[in-house]
Image (cartoon, rainbow, N blue to C red):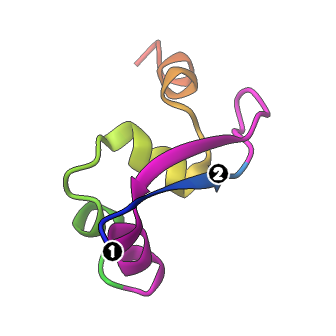
Amino acid sequence: MDDVITVETIACVHCGKGGTVKVLRRDYNRWKNGGGTIQEAFAEVPAGIREQLMSGIHDKCFDEIFADE
């Protein structure tokens, strides 16, 4: 059950485009079934991918949104 799945994410509020991320099925199922926070379920996944799973915001778009901070 450690196979990799492709998850479609919602449209990004910055660029308006959807996206996909690849994650382990077991981690995705744990998160979707209430197995803790996204940080706990995807402890080995970069923060940018976790953000895209939650909000749809791509890593590049996140950097553009918060460039001044």
The CA distance from mark 1 to mark 2 is: 22 Å
> Which kind of residue does numbered mark 2 sit on?
Thr
User: In the figure, 29 relative to 57: above or below?
Assistant: below
Q: Is residue 29 left or right of residue 16?
A: left
Residue depicted at x 74% and y 26%: 15
Locate residue 47, reporting x and y percent: 32, 42
> Which kind of residue does numbered mark 1 sit on?
Met
Residue depicted at x 62% and y 46%: 56
Report the span colored magenta. 11-34
Q: Circle 2 sits in a helix, a strand or a loop, which is it?
A: strand
Q: Circle 1 sits in a helix, a strand or a loop, which is it?
A: loop
Indicate whether residue 17 is drawn in magenta.
yes
| Residue 14, quarter of picture | top right
User: In the figure, 43 relative to 36: above or below?
Assistant: above
Q: Is residue 66 left or right of residue 31?
A: right
Residue tagged 2: 9
Locate residue 23, reporting x and y percent: 40, 54
User: In the figure, 21 relative to 67: above or below?
Assistant: below
Residue 1's disc is 1
| Dot 1 alpha-carbon crowd within 10 angstroms: few under 14, some 14 to 19, many 20 or more | few
Indicate whether residue 66 is drawn in magenta.
no
Residue depicted at x 23% and y 68%: 40
* Front residue of 20 and 34: 20
Q: Residue furthest top?
A: 68
Screen quadrant of the C terminus: top left
